Image (tube, rainbow, N blue to C red):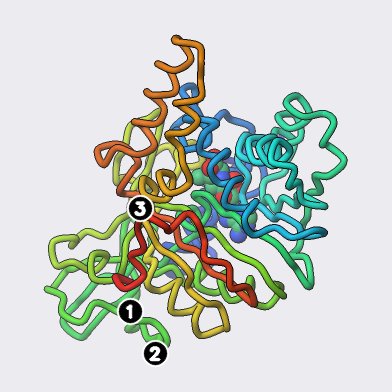
Amino acid sequence: MTLVSLEKIIKNTIIQKSEPIGFDEFMNLALYYPAKGYYSSGEQKFGERGDFITAPETSDLFGFCLARQCAQVLNNGDELLEFGAGSGVLAAQILFELGRLNKLPSTYFILELSAELQQRQKDTINKALPELMDRVVWLSTLPKNFSGVIIANEVLDAMPAKRLINQTDGFKELGVDYQDDKLVWQALKQLYINDKIQLPLEATYGYITEINERAIAWTESLSEIMDNGVVLLIDYGMGRDEYFHPQRNEGTLRCYYQHKASDNVFEYIGEQDITTSVNFSDIADKAFECGFTVSGYATQAMFLISLGIDEYLLSEKDEDKRISLAQQIKQLVLPSAMGESFKVLALSKNTRVKLKGFKEQDLTCKL
Ligand SMILES: C[S@@+](CC[C@H](N)C(=O)[O-])C[C@H]1O[C@@H](n2cnc3c(N)ncnc32)[C@H](O)[C@@H]1O
């Protein structure tokens, strides 16, 4: 048996089609191809030994604050659903804190595409909270008639996006072609037309940006399954004006390999993360259109501050632990770290609760 590399599989896909593939298809193969894609293979991704560190990997306080927000919303019998649960550490943090607050959900569902990560999540939760393991259920499809809280931390940015380039006749998709034994960028022939999605109104020749149709469709699917409750989306991203700023003329695409960022998607295929920032206006518009109320939008820093992240520091008696918590809080809230580039968007349905996480800041009008 010969082992075929993911790069070869992608090249063969292009050869078989006899035309370039869209960037979203390339990103989907690079991240999710069974057993070989970045998120489907067994390599360590999160944390210091991986390629990037997410907020729950940085500090338990992130999950504890999210749990406080969930506790405000969860009614008896409600459920929690986490998408793309990574190493499982966020689920463990949330369940731990909800237990302390006496607000455990009847079930904590996890919907994770990667079988390898599902196993890792089981190991993490079982190790941290064996007594709660029977409340955690892994799903392969969306549940129905959902009531409760849905959470997705850094999931939208991992959904395959389209990359567009402005040419003399308008925006075209930037695809991936195979020429002279190399993968290369190649604009597709036809114009990109989707009258439901707003493109930059003024863009110079060669201006590049991304559109995440899958994330928009995913938002719509949440409205179909939710009877009542709140969706909390946490990710790096911004509103449309900033997303399509004339100076952001190369888009937001980034790759992460062993904590180094680059924009070369054609190296380390299957071994590096590929990601684009979230256009939160697109998500909010779709959410509103399909019946959600946009009930809050804030920087991660102000969301965590509104939920009292400092109280955990003040109540810590041990000096060494306090110093360590202070370091973690800085990482989560400083503008130079994760505080401002990450945002929290809340969508709600059939609930009138004024969410505590947006007490100090609500930037909904910027969407
Ligand atoms: C950057 S990781 C974030 C992991 C984790 N939430 C954290 O904060 O550490 C992105 C995760 O999203 C998952 N993912 C991407 N698209 C998804 C989808 N449509 N449904 C469920 N999970 C998805 C990936 O498999 C991966 O686990």
x, y percent for residue 241:
23, 71
Give the mark nearest the N terminus, 1 or 3. 1
Q: Residue at x 74, y 60 (%)?
A: 75
In the rendered image, the quadrant that contains the C terminus is bottom left
Relative to 339, say whether 212 is above or below: below
Under tag 3, what secondary structure? strand
Mark 1: which amino acid?
Lys
x, y percent for residue 363:
33, 65
Is residue 279 in view from this perspective?
yes
Mark 2: which amino acid?
Asp
Under tag 1, what secondary structure? strand
**Viewer-nearest residue: 326 or 191:** 326
Nearer the observer: mark 3 or 2; the answer is 3
Residue position marked by numbered label 2 in the rendering: 195
Estimate how packed mark 3 is, as few (under 14), some (14 to 19) or many (20 or more) residues with alpha carbons within 10 Å: many
x, y percent for residue 191:
32, 84
Residue position marked by numbered label 1 in the rendering: 189
Q: Residue at x 13, y 73 (%)?
A: 205
Residues marked 3 and 2 touching at CB (< 8 Å): no
Residue 360: name its quadrant: bottom left
Q: Residue at x 76, y 62 (%)?
A: 141
**Viewer-nearest residue: 310 or 206:** 310
x, y percent for residue 92:
68, 35
Give the mark nearest the N terminus, 3 or 2. 2
Mark 3: which amino acid?
Thr
Residue position marked by numbered label 3 in the rendering: 299
**Viewer-nearest residue: 48 or 160:** 48
Q: Tell me the number on the disc at residue 233.
A: none
Q: Residue at x 72, y 75 (%)?
A: 227
